[in-house]
Image (cartoon, helix red, strand yellow):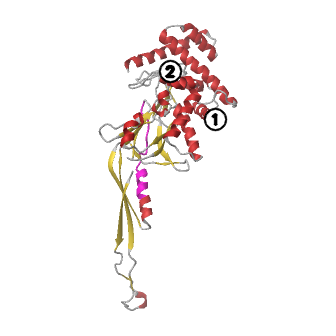
């Protein structure tokens, strides 16, 4: 954290200020005023920003999304935290006060956060990277948000069965990364506008030499530049876990590694079910360490193991449920699921809305799994799409054929990306 340098500067303000009493017509040399000396308290902070926190925001990818970074105080409230977009050494800030040393200290420390970047946005793949002060420890709260209006943020559709419909059909585009066929359907791989916020709460623990070597991916040993690295992806799952951690903090429960692990475990078991959660065992201690794979654009380093597939299939299925339009927006669905997970009741919820969402999500996950398995193996394709059409309530032959064509191309694209990554 910041190192403080304290300086006391007495100002020799006892310069004689002669008050000329011209009004009384006499020169009285005794009418001189000497002010008391003024003490100016100076505080200087010097710090380094070499603790990197990076990750991806995916539901599919969130492009040009606004990233906010804060920490939590003892009351569980979000408060500013100093961060930068690049590593920095010996960053110094100085402030003065004639009131007290504490006031000077507070002003100097406030300058650290006042110098935070004004705008932080994600890349085309949802990526972000920030640098915290060396030695920062405690909860780190990151939100990533997109908007339907007013900015350039967009969400990518990574559901095989699509993500609903545009308000008005966009223009045809074959620009790399922005391909659109020009119809009104939001198809797999297309970008669209939506009001969405994903979040993650990450606990940053001050490392010791021993901890740095045994904590694994949570505490990388750096890259030889003195930069320490943490990974914090922002996904459906981290958003649900974050809701529990934030509510707990407001109720007096401290955010810790143990709290993050408990929230991660509960989220995965409630959303995926125990059997599927075991496939993602590597994330049971911290769900932010994985799961940020955009099916429509598998990149270098993205894994498609059984655990990741379980996570992604459920996440993309939720997007298709939202796209259907009958169960609320994606933002509303995530909020409903977060509340249900906290209560420990998703599949057996007493809430009619959650029951409906869980039922639709189960169908959507089945659709995703059927399509993926059938197209990849080439077996049972007709039966798979017949069941998917039944789940979606599609009876028109042409509509089923269109669904099959689009979904098949989507899976083939995933296969191609996976082979070439």
Alpha carbon of mark 2 to alpha carbon of mark 1: how far?
A: 33 Å
The numbered dot on residue 343 is 1
Q: Residue furthest left?
A: 224
Q: Residue furthest bottom?
A: 26
Residue 326 visible within the image: no
Label 1 secondary element: helix
| Crowd class of label 2 (few under 14; some 14 to 19; many from 20; radius 10 Å) | many
In the rendered image, residue 99, in percent from the top left (x then y), is placed at 44, 67
Magenta-tinted stretch = 107-124
Q: Residue at x 63, y 23 (%)?
A: 360
The numbered dot on residue 416 is none
Q: Which of these two is toward me, 209 or 92?
A: 209
The numbered dot on residue 188 is 2
Q: Residue at x 51, y 15 (%)?
A: 372
The reply to whether the magenta stretch includes residue 324 is no
| Crowd class of label 1 (few under 14; some 14 to 19; many from 20; radius 10 Å) | few
Query: Which is nearer the N-term, disc 2 or disc 1?
Result: 2
Q: Which of these two is toward me, 114 or 359?
A: 359
């Amino acid at each position: 954290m910041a190192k403080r340098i304290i300086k006391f500067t007495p100002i020799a303000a006892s310069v004689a200020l002669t008050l000329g009493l011209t009004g009384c017509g006499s020169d009285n040399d005794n009418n001189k005023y000497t002010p008391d000396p003024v003490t100016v308290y100076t505080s200087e902070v010097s710090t380094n920003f070499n603790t990197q926190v990076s990750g991806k925001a995916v539901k599919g990818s969130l492009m040009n999304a606004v990233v906010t970074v804060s920490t939590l105080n003892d009351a569980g409230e979000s408060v500013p935290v100093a961060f930068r977009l690049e590593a920095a050494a010996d960053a110094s800030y100085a402030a003065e006060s004639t009131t007290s040393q504490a006031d000077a200290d507070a002003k100097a420390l406030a300058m650290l956060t006042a110098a935070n970047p004004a705008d932080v946005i994600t890349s085309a793949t949802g990526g972000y990277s920030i640098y915290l002060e060396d030695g920062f420890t405690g909860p780190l709260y990151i939100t990533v948000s997109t908007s339907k209006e007013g900015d350039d943020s967009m969400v990518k559709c990574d559901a095989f069965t699509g993500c609903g419909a545009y308000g008005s059909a966009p223009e045809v585009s074959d620009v790399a990364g922005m391909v659109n066929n020009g119809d009104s359907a939001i198809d797999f791989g297309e970008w669209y506008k939506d009001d969405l916020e994903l979040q993650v709460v990450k606990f940053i623990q001050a490392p010791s030499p021993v901890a740095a070597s045994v904590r694994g991916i949570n505490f990388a040993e750096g890259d030889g530049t003195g930069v320490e690295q943490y990974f914090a992806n922002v996904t459906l799952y981290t958003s649900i876990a974050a809701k529990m951690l934030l509510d707990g903090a407001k109720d007096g429960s401290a955010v810790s590694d143990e709290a993050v692990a408990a929230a991660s475990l509960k989220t995965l078991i409630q959303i995926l079910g125990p059997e599927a959660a075991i496939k993602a065992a590597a994330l049971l201690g911290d769900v932010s360490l994985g799961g940020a794979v955009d099916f429509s654009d598998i990149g270098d380093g993205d894994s498609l193991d059984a655990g990741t597939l379980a996570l992604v299939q459920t996440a993309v299925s939720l997007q298709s449920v939202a796209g259907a339009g009958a169960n609320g927006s994606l933002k509303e669905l995530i909020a409903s699921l977060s509340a249900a997970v906290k209560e420990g009741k998703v599949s057996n919820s007493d809430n009619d809305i959650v029951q409906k969402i869980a039922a639709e999500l189960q169908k959507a996950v089945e659709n995703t799994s059927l399509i993926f398995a059938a197209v990849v193996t080439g077996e049972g394709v007709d039966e798979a799409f017949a069941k998917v059409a039944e789940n979606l309530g599609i009876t028109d032959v042409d509509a089923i054929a269109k669904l099959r064509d689009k979904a098949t191309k989507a899976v083939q694209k995933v296969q191609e990306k996976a082979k070439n990554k």
